[in-house]
Amino acid sequence: MGKCLTVNLSTKTLKTLDVDKELLLSFMGGRGLGVKLLWDLVPPSTKPFSEENILVFAVGPLTSTPIPTTGRFSIVSKSPLTGGIFYSSCGGFFGFKLKNVGFDYILVEGRSSTPIYLYIDDKNFELRDASHLWGKTTKETFKILEEDLGKDFSFVCIGPAGENLVRYACVMGGYGNFAGRGGLGAVMGFKRLKAIAVKGTGKPKIADEEGLAKALKNFRDRISWNPVLDKALAYYGTSALVNVINEHRILPTKNFQLNRFEDAENISGETLKEKIFVRRRSCYNCPVGCKRMTKTGSGREGEGPEFETLASLGSMLLIGDVEAVAEINYLCNDLGLDTISFGGTVACAMELSEKGLPDARVKWGDAETVKRLVVDTAYRRGLGRWLAEGSKIFSEKFGFAEASMNVKGLELPMYHPDGVFGQALAYATSNRGACHLNAYLISVEVLGYPYLMDRFSPVNKPSIVVYMQNLAAVMDSMVVCKFLGFEFDEETFANLLTLVTGKTFTQESLITIGERIWNLERVFNFKAGLGWETDRLPSRFKVPLQPMLKEYYRVRGWKPNGYPTKNKLKSLGLNVEDEC
Amino acid sequence: MKVPKEVYEELKDYCLRIARRGYVTAHGGNASIKSGNLMWITRHASSLENLKPEDVIQVSLEKPSSFDVLASLETIVHRQIYLETPNLAVLHAHPPISVALSFFMDEMIPIDTEGYYVLKKVPVVEGQPGSLELAKNVAIALKSYYAVIVRAHGVFAAAKYMDIAYQYLCMVEHSAEILWLTEVLKKSGLTLHKPKKF
């Protein structure tokens, strides 16, 4: 099938290799491929900030095809925030360009002694000095690289937060696109890899072009008939969710102490559209166009904010002003911070401040101080030095661990678990920590796609969570946008994969690949110290988690301690010798 | 967005009635009530047999709202009906005989007395569920008629009161059943005797 590029930053050696076909068949690409490489090359006890940790940038078999949303890529590494395996998916055009060079993945090993960036085009690849980029914001970095190399290139880069090893520094993968969570930007920063520039002009081969064209006619029609994809996301972007989630009393407010925000209307999709909306923006080959360019009254402009950011920097901090939230978001984007984790950590600080902790001086609703804290965090100054560690370490330092809303060290996304039991279970069991994208139960517990389930009932939720987690692992490995899950399932994806690759995929084989990826991640995490005791929710929540967890382990074919049984691993073709 | 108790009770009552009549499947059909410049409509994928307060969504008639994403897929059709006709209540269901007959005709003219006197004619229109094309076709038909059949899909009935919309919906299916039975009996060899005064 394809090729890969391996880059050793310590020795400055680059080489291309053929990719093992069996590897692609078993783990697909994207996230799955990265997870397998991490398992093969990095002992689970490896420190995230060490030369031994690796970074994998991977595309999938559907990347750069005419199938909508296939410009994405995945990044996999060991997270400095959770200490576990981590994968993050990113939109934009970088994946599309990388696939067009002919690479299935880039494997980055070692650590450079000086700032560098990786240059790739159709014929050449090399490491280049990045001294002139070090210290620059993401926006400045993109601008300089674009001026130097031309607009035909796509880039990923980190900002000062990544350089300063903020544990939740993100990777920017095109302007306004982020591999946001888990601090993979800090891993790049540790390796002193400021950016990757890529320009590929080739095209991947498609086994059955005619068949694919026919299938895509129906595929596009279905997108245009789906109210979430064609109407809500197209009209408001993800901000459409603010009012909806608030009215269901699941909008995290005041660090999850409340589930409804009185000022939600002021940070809603409607208000965003009225006050700061400039234009829509799309990733590669996406008919949905959920991205939003915005501009505030003070003349500042940028990308977003998305729903998660409106809540994490809005309702979570009691900031009921869309312009203030947008400006904090622009700062996070420029400096390279994950807005969910930053918002969650500042909310934690606000709660501790309210409890009277003298060192955490930040009040609810104080947008100006929050703006200052973004900068302080990115440069690790003052209180920002501790905020940069994430809410778990921050709260533990101040002796109030219960104020950190995290699972496995990753701050919770913006759906209050008490009102969505399935989503709560998905948070608790996600391999990368509290995550909504590993199984988006909001789709069935709130939006009714493809069906509507009782959100307060635990019945059948473990089975649905398992199914959705496996499907999400496959979608991250193909690599496609999760929004497609509002309309399509493994049946459609199996058909598209068959048409593109010429290999026969079935619904069952696809879900098995997802299950294989999920189980390998689980084993890695156990060996890295993230065992069953980390499948938990903060004590603040009142979800009946234990009975659901017990059933979840059983449905997964795991032992009562949450570790996969020998038979399960064997049936998935995973050769794991010892047990936990 | 909390639904007023009386609105919820009314929708719950009539949704349960059409479900019990077998006019919808477990999660099919939808209903709405207009109130000024907004409407209350059943939630996407909700069960009309067991409608809960959370299953009634408030949607603006004048502009899209973020709550549209929760509302029935056919919200666009309900909105168009309210914008183009003076109706205040809309019911949409999938009564099987009306749907079956829609494959064979472009309009249904009831042959039973009650159906004929009240409905006169029930047009059959087409359009993809949830599409603007369907919304326009249905709204135009409901300017002149009390109910309309969407080919291969279902029936929309609209009126000033929910009870009357329900009556129209039931009449469409009843008339369709009479028409179908008559055709079956004719084909079995019986002679049709049309009433002398209709």
Image (cartoon, helix red, strand yellow):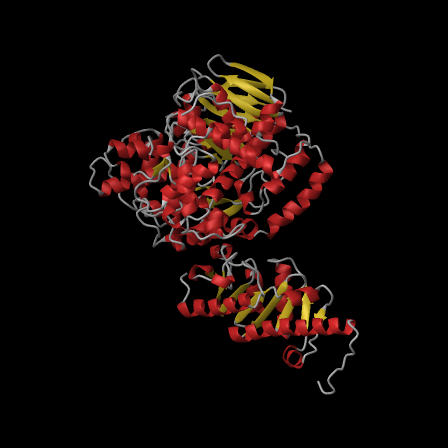
A93 up-or-down from B77: above or below: above
Q: Is residue A552 left or right of residue A283?
A: left
Q: Where does the image place residue A244, in percent across and percent down from the top left?
A: 44, 53
* Residue displayed at 66% across by 47% down: A218
Q: Where does the image place residue B4, in percent across and percent down from the top left?
A: 41, 67
Residue extending farthest top: A11
Which of the image's four quarters has the C terminus of chain B?
bottom right
A497 up-or-down from B25: above or below: above
A238 up-or-down from A181: above or below: below
* Residue displayed at 42% across by 15% down: A113
Q: Where does the image place residue B68, in percent across and percent down from the top left?
A: 50, 57
Is residue A199 visible in the rendered image? The answer is no
Q: Is residue A25 left or right of residue A77?
A: right
Is residue A5 visible in the rendered image? The answer is yes
Looking at the image, which is closer to me, B17 or A160? Answer: B17
* Residue displayed at 66% across by 32% down: A501
